[in-house]
Image (tube, coloured by chain):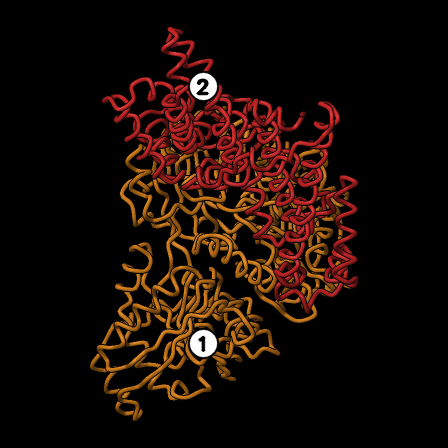
Chain colours: A orange, B red
């Protein structure tokens, strides 16, 4: 999720308190990957191949939700909210299953050489559920709605600061021209978030219309919502006639319903129940994500102000053991760099592995033998965090480092962002937006710079890349930026979580997606037999 | 509720001493007194509920979290809804007068009237408890009578052992076992959860109700049955039953007319306690079966810091306690000749 930054992040932090750990971190907006590595039968998703029949009802069991559930296209918070908006509304571009941009309601989004003027060509022949044609006016209306500078919604955080509202204009019914105050080469990725669905200029939340494969039928917050197949959908029309999204506040109720055949899909299947579901004929859909729970070391405070100490700590971690024990094996290795799905991800840098001897010698060189540190953690980071913290204590012992874990309730209080050594959680993003929000000084957009990283050279590279339209040049700049973080950064990124969702025996067509659970909730591709 | 018997009060002790009044008037006074006491109880409960929810801290801060400082408009909006500028006492009386007028206020989380929000779930829970009672009462009495019939013989021992074992099981264990047996693992006869149809009630599909009801029934029947059995035994061993037998009255009539009627009073008391308990205690069962009732609503409201909804639901649960116990007391009096005459003479 690119610039979904602040509002959504805050909410997700709060949500975490409410629902069982990891599930929601994912929901709050991000991405998950393909791979189907984890499970034998997840290849091809829920039996993705084979004949798919039409008709029937698909009931999706969504984790969480409550009386605050909403149908607002631009303010989804909970899992059921996200599932709903993903089927009712559509953005101008899609993040596809491999986390790349592809055209949706826009046929093309092209930037000028200076990355300041962007021309959006609307797809022809797309209609809203009420039959009205989708025009550039609707797109401009929707963009303005999320990026109101006074109260930007989650998709509009970045847009509201860079858009020149006066100069941007609707050229003709199929062309929208966005003008920026500053060059920004990633504008297209901002337009692809599920939180920026295009709605008509006369949108009414009481009878919400969008362009998605399913049209609104009924909505009972905290309980259930129903949708009917939109026959005039511009893409692949849905297989099922009706879609129902049912809220579940309890994990075991959700899994029982799946086993009993009352529902066909669930998001965020608990790891310990995967075998149960597979035993009853269903399956687990395993998707990789770019979501991570790092250890954060403040680079401006002793002992971590010494880069040798930071590198030693990174060498202490047994990454595979972290994944095996805290994620039940459902994870991929991290290499102290984030944004693994970014085309510019520096995958050529050597994988860092546990090396106690070198860690010891680095610590000795830094005069920090027998180092004692306090590690702050909390349940509100997610259930993974305390488990990882306790495991780190064990791993650090081998290098003679004495780690004392302090569990805070809540972790996200006034002291958050000033802990010398702590943890945090992040969802999938590409490199530039993540670098800005996580490693820039607060006055330059670094709202959650846990490590107090302040590196002018790194910042210049990122800023330069953000204005560079040439993909090769951009990748080169970002590679240099990542090298700096790989060598000196304050983050220990040991792994990325895999998303696990469940489906029943009679479900076909699900494919793993890096973006959102259950193949980005694209239920039009799912059939039920 | 492990030891319901000790909680039972003897209705005979609570009656006013005989007064020199005639039947109807004496009854009216007695009922008025009981009603007055019930209202007093509810009023005390309302103070407790209000203070408890007020003591939870500033709900606006809790709802908005980090946005508290960033979003003064929303803060003002919520504070207006809560009347936070007024004193605690005046807020209490505003709320109380609203309650008395049937106005439960506006939900903070959703902005909807509380009564609209909770209406369905209250009805759903009431239906669940009603069905459970409908099955549980005859069942408990039947088991007790069978048990007494075979007392101190093997069938009685077996029944008592089973009841005791079941009484020791928490409701979610019963629910999970039933789910595994009838819904997910062994058989697939009944649905595991309630998939609410957007327009109808959960019981539109009767099968949905079976497992939740059964869980409640299996959970409370052992207590009721054991209490009824022990009071039946006490009666059966009494001299007047012995005398009835000696007079040659058939055993069936002895059981029905002499024993059961006299043993029914403790039964009514324990049933009332259990029903009242169920009204507030269905949370776990509702969560397990995703049944859209009061319990789920209450949990959601607490999570959302939706003060008004919490207050309204707490008051409803308290009222159920009071009303059910009141009815039980009246029934007990009516069924106890000694008490009846004590009042009207």
Disc 1: CA contacts within 10 A as few (<14), some (14-19) or many (>=20): many
Q: Quadrant of residue A200?
A: top right
Q: Which residue is mark 1?
A: A481
In 3D space, how far apart are the residues under numbered discs 1 and 2 (Cα atoms)?
Answer: 86 Å
Is A324 left or right of B77, judged from the image as shown?
left
Q: Nearer the viewer, residue A357 or A53?
A: A357
Q: Which mark is residue B248?
A: none
Q: Quadrant of the C terminus of chain A?
A: top left
Q: Is residue B165 above or below residue B76?
A: above
Asked if labels 2 and 1 touch by Cβ distance under 8 angstroms, the answer is no
Q: Residue furthest front?
A: B20
The structure residue drawn at horizontal position 58% and vertical position 77%, both measured from the top left corner, is: A442
Disc 2: CA contacts within 10 A as few (<14), some (14-19) or many (>=20): many
Chain letter for the residue marked with disc 1 in the picture: A
Is A390 left or right of A173, judged from the image as shown?
left
Question: Residue A62 location in percent, x, y?
Answer: 49, 42
Q: Is residue A14 above or below residue A136?
A: below
Total marks in image: 2
Q: Which residue is mark 2?
A: B260
Q: Nearer the viewer, residue B275 or A380?
A: B275
Q: Nearer the viewer, residue A212 or A325?
A: A325
Question: Residue B46 location in percent, x, y?
Answer: 68, 49
Question: Residue A364 location in percent, x, y?
Answer: 26, 90
The structure residue drawn at horizontal position 54% and vertical position 33%, both measured from the top left corner, is: A244
Chain letter for the residue marked with disc 2 in the picture: B
Q: Quadrant of residue A321?
A: bottom left
The structure residue drawn at horizontal position 69% and vertical position 36%, both measured from the top left corner, is: B35
The secondary structure type at the circle numbered 2 is helix
Asked whether the viewer can see residue B316, the reply is yes
Q: Tell if the residue under mark 1 belongs to the same chain as the one under mark 2.
A: no
């Amino acid at each position: 999720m690119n610039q979904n930054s602040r509002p959504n992040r805050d909410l997700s932090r709060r949500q975490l308190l409410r629902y069982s750990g990891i599930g929601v971190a994912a929901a709050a907006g991000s991405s998950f990957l393909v791979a189907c590595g984890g499970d034998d039968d997840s290849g091809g998703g829920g039996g993705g191949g084979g004949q798919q029949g039409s008709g029937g009802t698909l009931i999706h069991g969504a984790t969480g939700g409550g009386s605050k559930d909403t149908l607002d296209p631009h303010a989804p918070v909970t899992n059921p909210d996200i599932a709903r908006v993903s089927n009712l509304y559509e953005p101008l571009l899609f993040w596809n299953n491999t986390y790349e941009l592809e055209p949706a309601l826009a046929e093309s989004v092209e930037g000028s050489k200076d990355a300041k003027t962007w021309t959006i060509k609307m797809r022809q022949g797309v209609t809203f559920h009420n039959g009205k044609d989708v025009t550039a006016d609707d797109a401009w209306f929707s963009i303005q709605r999320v990026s109101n500078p006074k109260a930007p919604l989650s998709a509009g955080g970045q847009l509201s600061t860079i858009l020149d509202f006066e100069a941007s204009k609707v050229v003709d019914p199929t062309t929208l021209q966005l003008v920026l105050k500053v060059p920004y080469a990633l504008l297209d990725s901002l337009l692809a978030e599920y939180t920026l669905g295009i709605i008509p200029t006369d949108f009414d939340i009481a009878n919400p219309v969008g362009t998605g494969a399913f049209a609104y039928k009924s909505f009972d917050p905290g309980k259930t919502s129903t949708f009917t197949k939109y026959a005039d959908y511009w893409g692949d029309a849905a297989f099922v006639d009706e879609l129902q999204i049912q809220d579940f506040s309890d994990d075991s109720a959700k899994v029982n319903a799946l086993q009993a055949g009352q529902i066909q899909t669930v998001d965020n299947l608990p790891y310990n129940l995967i075998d149960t579901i597979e035993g009853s004929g269903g399956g687990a859909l395993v998707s990789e994500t770019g979501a991570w729970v790092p250890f954060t070391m403040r680079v401006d405070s002793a002992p971590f102000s010494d880069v040798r100490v930071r590198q030693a700590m990174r060498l202490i971690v047994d990454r595979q053991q972290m994944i095996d024990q805290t994620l039940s094996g459902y994870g991929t290795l991290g290499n102290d760099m984030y944004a693994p799905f970014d085309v510019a991800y520096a995958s050529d840098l050597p994988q860092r592995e546990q090396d106690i001897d070198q860690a010891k010698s680095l610590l000795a060189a830094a005069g920090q033998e027998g180092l004692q540190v306090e590690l702050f953690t909390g349940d509100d980071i997610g259930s993974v965090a305390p488990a990882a913290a306790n495991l780190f204590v064990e791993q650090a012992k081998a290098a003679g480092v004495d780690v004392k874990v302090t569990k805070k309730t809540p972790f996200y209080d006034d002291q958050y962002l000033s802990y010398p050594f702590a943890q945090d959680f992040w969802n999938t993003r590409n490199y530039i937006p993540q670098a800005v929000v996580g490693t820039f000084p607060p006055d330059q957009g670094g709202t959650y710079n846990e490590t107090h990283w302040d590196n002018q050279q790194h910042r210049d590279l990122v800023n330069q890349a953000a204005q560079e339209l040439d993909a090769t040049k951009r990748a080169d700049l970002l590679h240099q930026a990542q090298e700096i973080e790989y060598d000196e950064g304050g983050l220990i990124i040991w792994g990325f979580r895999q998303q696990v969702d469940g489906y029943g025996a009679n479900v076909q067509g699900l494919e793993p997606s890096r973006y959102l659970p259950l193949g980005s909730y694209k239920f039009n591709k799912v059939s039920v037999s | 509720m492990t030891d319901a018997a000790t909680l039972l009060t003897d209705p005979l002790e609570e009656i006013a001493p005989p007064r020199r009044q005639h039947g109807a008037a004496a009854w009216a006074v007695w009922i008025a007194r009981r009603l007055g006491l019930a209202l007093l109880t509810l009023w005390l409960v309302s103070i407790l509920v209000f203070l408890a929810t007020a003591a939870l801290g500033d709900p606006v801060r809790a709802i908005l979290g980090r946005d508290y400082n960033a979003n003064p408009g929303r803060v003002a909006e919520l504070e207006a809804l809560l009347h936070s500028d007024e004193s605690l006492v005046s807020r209490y009386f505003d709320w109380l007068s609203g309650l008395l007028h049937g106005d439960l206020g506006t939900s903070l989380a959703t902005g909807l009237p509380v009564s609209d929000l909770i209406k369905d779930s209250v009805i759903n829970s009431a239906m669940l408890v009603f069905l459970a009672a409908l099955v549980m009462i005859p069942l408990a009495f039947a088991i007790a009578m069978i048990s007494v019939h075979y007392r101190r013989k093997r069938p009685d021992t077996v029944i008592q052992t089973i009841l005791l074992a079941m009484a020791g099981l928490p409701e979610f264990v019963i629910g999970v076992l039933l789910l595994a047996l009838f819904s997910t693992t062994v058989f697939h006869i009944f649905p595991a959860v309630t998939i609410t149809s957007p327009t109808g009630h959960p019981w539109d599909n009767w099968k949905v109700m079976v497992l939740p009801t059964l869980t409640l029934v299996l959970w409370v029947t052992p207590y009721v049955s054991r209490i009824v059995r022990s009071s039946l035994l006490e009666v059966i061993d009494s001299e007047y039953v012995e005398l009835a037998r000696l007079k040659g009255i058939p055993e069936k009539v002895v059981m029905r007319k002499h024993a059961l009627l006299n043993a029914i009073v403790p039964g009514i008391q324990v049933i009332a306690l259990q029903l009242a308990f169920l009204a507030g205690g269905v949370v776990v069962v509702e969560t397990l079966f995703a049944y859209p009732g009061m319990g789920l609503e209450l949990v959601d409201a607490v999570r959302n810091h939706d003060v008004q909804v919490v207050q309204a639901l707490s008051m409803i649960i308290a009222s159920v306690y009071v009303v059910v116990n009141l009815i039980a007391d009246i029934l007990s009096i009516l069924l106890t000749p000694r008490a009846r005459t004590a009042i009207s003479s």
